[in-house]
Image: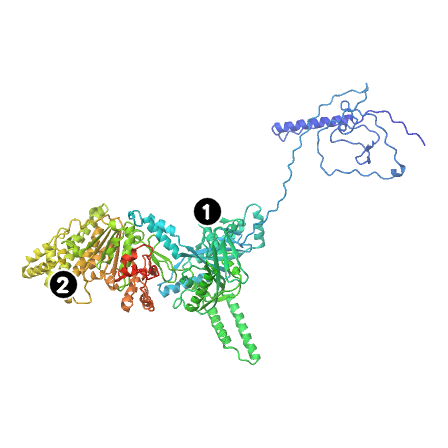
Amino acid sequence: MEPPPPPPPPARNPFAATEAANRELDQARSVAARRSRSAPPATPSAPPPTPPQAAPPPAGPPRTVAGEMGQTRSGPVRFTGPPPAARRPGVDPASGQHPVVPQPPTVDPRLSSRPPAPPVADPRPPRRTAPVAPPPVPAPPPRRSQQLVPLPPAPPAPERPHRMPKPPRERDRTAAQELAITEIAGHTTFTPTSVTAWYRLPEVRWAFRPDPEREALISAIAEQYAGMAGYRLHLRRTTRPFPADEWARTVDRNTPRPLPPVPGAPSWADHLVAAQRHLHDVQHSEGQIYLGISFARRTLADTLGEKFGRLFGKGTRDAERHRIAKVTEQFDEVLGAFGVRARRATSHELEWLIFRSVALGMEPPELLSAVRDGHWEPGDVLAMTEQIERYRTPYGSTVKLVNRLTGEERHVAVLTVGRMEDLEIPERHEPWLHFHERAPWPMELSSRIDVLGPGEAFRNLEHRLRMIRSQQHDYDEHSMDAPPELERLAQRALVVGDEMTTGLATDAARVHGWHRLAVAADTRDECLERARKVIQMYNRDLRISLQHPKNQDWLAREFIPGEPVANTGYLRRMPVRLFAAALPQAASHVGDRRGDLIGRTAGTCRRPVFLDLHFPTEVRERSGLAVFVAEPGGGKSTLMGALGYLAARRGVQVTLLDPSGPLARLCEMPELKPYSKVLNLTGSEGGTLAPYALIPTPRREHWDPGPEAEREFHIAVSNARAERRMLVQDICSMLVPPQVAREASTARLLRHAARQVPAEETSTLEDVVACLRGQGEEGEELAALLMDTAEMPLAMLFFGSPPSDMLTDDALLTVITMAGLRLPDLKIEREYWSAEEALALPMLHTAHRLAVRRSYGGDIHRRKLVGLDEAHFMEGWRSGRSFLVRMARDSRKWNLAALVASQNPKDILGLDVQNLVSTVFVGRIAEDAEIAAEALRMLRVPRDVGYEQTLASLSEADTTEDSRLPYREFIMRDVDGRVQRVRADISYVPGLLDHLDTTPGGRQAAARPTDASPTATDPAQ
């Protein structure tokens, strides 16, 4: 074995120059980079500087360098990274010389035949790093022949950026929504599969409306529904408790000077609180109707787009919203016309609808959401169901709802419309989806319908006709007689098919749907009892079978917008016109929302009735004349006294003329006594009813400045003088015997005397008598007859001048009576009247003037009310007719509410003031059909269509009972032309009904505790 060869002598490093050149190149590049950041950019014409090139390595045999993985590589090597001195150990950092390199170990010849492995490429990109100084190694002494060149210092190594740790990935739970609705945007609601646009339907007048107008309304609604062919509609009718607090604030705001408080009597605030409590006890509610149209089915792209948008805090895509907006504009055009007159529902209204649908029949929250931006995100929809808990059983007859915040519990029973007969609307029947309003408790309504166009409806009809023919063929094959109802159904299908093919599009359209009613109560037994009464009411009056199905919880969820149909049973198929005639938006509103509470409607639904007698003059700018017509005992005097009391509580100057005297008891009430006055004409001083002084002279300050107003003022003064002359002539004709009054010379002499006497307020009847005495023998005789009448005690009221304080009375309530005066019967000739009855006519005539005289003497803008009873005595005289016409025309200018009561509507119609009447109350008229027809003419409702029987049924007593009727009913027509049946109810005012009771012995009967009902003695309810 040969010894190993000696190591070669140390040689000079051939890569020293290359390493130095590389370091210089790196240094130059770093300097250039710093200059490029600080200096302005170079112009494109200047070429970049060329870096110095390193000297090529000397030629020689290939050198073998050890690899990283124990493999070898050969050939010249050029370093592009840090200098080898920094990477290889044993290099002097000052001189760059290498120490003696030992020989590589002996390689096994058996392995030398293997080819060298290819170099392993680094997958990472090359990275420039700062040179790192190796640990100090002792260097050999340098040779003399080697020249030492100092190296520049290495640049400092840059600091590596600190990397933050990645946050943990958390998976939050999805919100557990109980509703199918995922989003609300404006008037649209979104579900994962559909979009529904919601509209609010206003209520329409139905009661006491002519049949042609009703039919036109139904036809218009049917055409609009037919235009929705191909869509599913959701019709919802809900109720909202009447806002009694809002009404009380409105009344208080419109009452600037209420009646001052009296110690020991209810104050103005107590009066309003009592009215609010009465409204809450009676449970008055208002109906709200919503119509939802599911018009767009969402595609997979829309659903995925919404889910992707939620990651960035967005909802539905803008493209989808733009498409929805175009479709809803078409619906706005169709539903906004005459008939439905729908408008877009607001987000606040949708919030209320969803809450009432989730909490059926429960008390609404005091405050809903305060945000009004119109958008509800999926996480916010949870707020609509968080408060309500549901308890149900698989076969339960009701659903128990519990408000977990307030503890309120309600039981709900859902009824569905089953088999029904053909209805004749409007000729015989009421709207069948509005009929439940007759019940004294509120209910919820939900109808899901599919509108079928002519083509689809005809295909459905052909399919059913083939089914009928197939059944008939089966009976024939088995030699059996087919049931006769099959042939009737077939003939009906043929008739309907002929109407669909030859008629209009409205006749061909059909509606398929499900109709539900929700009845709610505090207990389960009460809820089931109410449901039984509703079922009985529909079966008896409309021949509609209501069913109480299973799965009540599923059916109750149908009322919630967006929820699917729970049970497809009891599907009702009908023409679109019959569904339009259901008319759930039929209304029974009458009166205004800023007046006093006077009762409730008693027709197809129960709504509170408010009346402000100055609403026509102050808001509608019309006459303030209100007319009361009823037979004796109909309640017109009691209602007039109640309106006078309510007006006095609001600080209105009230003057009531009651010839019989019962209304004078109003002045005995504690809250009115310090501000009231009773004027009994039968015991008054002489001259109280002096005719010249009863007509006031117009005052210039009541007219605007200017020449035109000046001319109107002079015309008014002339009219007042002419009216005085007519009044004096009529009073003198009433005072003389009727045989003398009918002579032509009497009228001529009175007219001449009235012309000679100055028609001023200071003139008296004595001046007329003096003028007659100077007109010959006939004048002397007529003057003697007048003076003979003046000797009677009651006739002294017409002669002389009135007391100084008579026309300047400032009492808030004044009641003028003629206690003990016997009024004549106008059906009997005047020749057969007694002397007392003959004097009652001129007294009543001048008393009307006295009542109105107080209203014309004060501020023209102050609210005033005048109630005149027995107005039929004024119709037969020229001055009386002129007086009523003038009062009706001047009522708006003087802000005067005039209440005129009469037993016969002809007395009012004969005055030609029908177009000036703003409000009409018609009570019971049961005996004479002609008088009832005249009353309907005053109400402006159709005659000879059955409404005469309605007037006869007002305040109808039960013949099986011997107690008094505790209420009174009227047909009321307000200033806006709405007509409804009204039941007067003022029982919330303590003691008022006792003071207004005009029935003989009524106050004593009311004091006895024989009647359990608190309103048993109410003659005006």
Instruction: Write down the residue under mark 1.
Output: 370
- Residue type at mark 2: give it: Ala
Answer with left or right where residue 355 lies relative to residue 254.
Answer: right
x and y, in percent, of residue 692 in the image: 15, 53
**Dot 2 crowding, Cα within 10 Å, few <14, some 14–19, many 20+:** few
Q: Residue furthest left?
A: 777
Answer with left or right where residue 460 lies relative to residue 210.
Answer: right
**Dot 1 crowding, Cα within 10 Å, few <14, some 14–19, many 20+:** few
User: Relative to 221, does residue 496 appear above or below in the rendering?
Assistant: below
Residue 917 in sight in this render: no
The residue lying toward the viewer, choosing from 774 and 836, is 836
The residue lying toward the viewer, choosing from 920 and 326, is 920
Residue 799 in sight in this render: yes
Which corner quadrant holds the C terminus? bottom left
Q: Residue furthest right?
A: 1
Secondary structure, mark 1, is loop
x and y, in percent, of residue 24 in the image: 72, 26
Secondary structure, mark 2, is helix
- Give the foreground label among 2 and 1: 2
* Residue 34, quarter of the rendered image: top right
Answer with left or right where residue 600 lies relative to residue 14.
Answer: left
Task: Name the disc covering residue 265, or none.
Answer: none
- Residue type at mark 1: give it: Ala
Q: Residue furthest top?
A: 144
The residue lying toward the viewer, choosing from 31 and 321, is 321
Instruction: Write down the residue under mark 2.
Output: 835
User: Relative to 57, does residue 338 appear above or below in the rendering?
Assistant: below
User: Relative to 174, does residue 627 appear above or below in the rendering?
Assistant: below
Marks 2 and 1, how far apart at CA: 74 Å
